[in-house]
Amino acid sequence: MADTSYSHLLKDAQARLSDYLTPSIRLGVTGLSRAGKTVFITALVRNLVSGGRLPFFAADAEHRIVRAYLEPQPDDSVPRFDYEAHLADLLSTPPIWPESTKRISELRVTIEYRSAYALKRLAGYSKLHVDIVDYPGEWLIDLPMLEQDYRTFSATALALANSQSRAEFAKPFLDFLAGTDPAAAEDEQIAITGARLFTAYLRAMRDSGAQSTLAPGRFLLPGELDGSPLLTFFPMPLTSDERLPRGSLAAMMARRFESYKTLVVKPFFNDHFARLDRQIVLVDVLTALHRGAEAVGDLERAMTEILRAFRPGANSWLSMFLGRRIDRVLFAATKADHLPASSHDRLEAILREILQEAVKRAQTEGAGVHALALSALRATREATARQGRESLPCLRGTPIKGERIGDVTFDGATEAAIFPGDLPVDPTAALNAARHAKSASLELVRFAPPKLADTLPDGKPAAFPHIRLDRALDFLISDYLT
């Protein structure tokens, strides 16, 4: 009995030591409004654990991936990403898109592989832990606030609220602000009313498709902080750099702004963001192009603010003392399946063009920044339709109920062939046209998820169809699998 117990303890100790010595990579996944973050993570994990076809993922293309599987996550204080529930939604009848997550969550996938080096292969299979850290894009937008004081925050927020594209949404808040004196005595009811109106404006902007400058992000996703004084402040017009009067409403707002930074933004940065090794940011470029000048301008501001939040650069032994750096950032234009294959490279080129300008404005070194167009779960199939003598590249899929093109309203159950239009070949010309137009000449609808098989005839789990998900994996983790 004692020998059995000793053997069990020894095996457990060996397993713990092996896990401790196994390298890990912390992959941050975030997305701007409606970019498909939850579906991306679910599809990525499904294709890894099912041994899906990933021809542009080097380790898989070289047949060095042995298997991938889920393991308990290492951070006991972080909720687990509910992979199984999201997978069940996509496999249900009829399939439904999973609800987006509204908090930070994590999932560990372990990959067993054969090394590319003969000497390393003598030791047997190698392992890599991939810790996927999922967090709302609104939290990423908050990070630039760490370098702002209340005056700077207020000036920036009010300039945007008064801009032509936002004034209509912000009118109730701006009207309230016009009758509010910053030098008046602090008043909790005024603070509550102002914060409610400011939050309603931010929410209306998000619902309109705005991507950026929606800080503070927790106003949109309050969670357990709902009703807290930490979320009960708003920007005010301050006309000078003089010290705010003690006990004034403006001083109260400034104090709560600093508390928000200290108790909400900094903990996220220190506990989660600063620990990431790689990052992917999912961006709905296509919808911005479709909506025209205001949406494109908003997206460009978002890219600049996001790049300011990153510290891209190579990790080295100095990282142990100076702090780790996110050495690769992938910006991915999602919904590539809403365009024919001929436009996938063009969508990618447009995102790359946006990023080049954003890198300059953000004054970042831009090391390891890459752009890609993808669809983590392909909801359409390529098809061809004839119009007279001309052949048009179309997409076949099931538009969501209520979606419209012209006079046609879709019922949510009938498959349709749609010609969405083509993106211009020249990305600069495409962006310039979008910057000066109300909308692009694209026919876009939202598609329902495809009907997916849970298992193959041999009983193994079926992989999910995708566009360039393998290229994203290759950029983000291939160098860890050598």
Image (cartoon, rainbow, N blue to C red):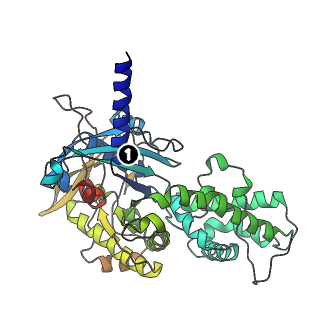
Does 427 sit above or below residue 404? below
For label 1, the crowd category at 10 Å Cα-Cα, with few meaning under 14, some 14 to 19 and many 20 or more, is: few
Q: Position of residue 95 (x, y in %)?
A: 35, 37
Q: Residue at x 18, y 56 (%)?
A: 58
Q: Residue at x 25, y 60 (%)?
A: 479
Q: Secondary structure at mark 1?
A: helix
Q: Residue at x 29, y 68 (%)?
A: 348
Residue 335: name its quadrant. bottom left
Residue 441, visible in the rendered structure: yes
Residue 401: name its quadrant. top left
Three-letter amino acid code at disc 1?
A: Tyr
Quadrant where the N terminus sits is top left
Q: Position of residue 44 (x, y in %)?
A: 31, 48
The mark tally for this picture is 1
Residue 238: name its quadrant. bottom right
Quadrant where the C terminus sits is bottom left
Q: Position of residue 377 (x, y in %)?
A: 30, 48
Does 73 sit above or below residue 162? above
Residue 196, visible in the rendered structure: no
Q: 358 or 195, which is in the foreground?
A: 358
Q: Which residue is mark 1?
A: 20
Q: Position of residue 324 (x, y in %)?
A: 44, 64
Q: 205 or 310, which is in the foreground?
A: 310
Outermost residue toward the front in this view: 2
Outermost residue toward the top in this view: 1
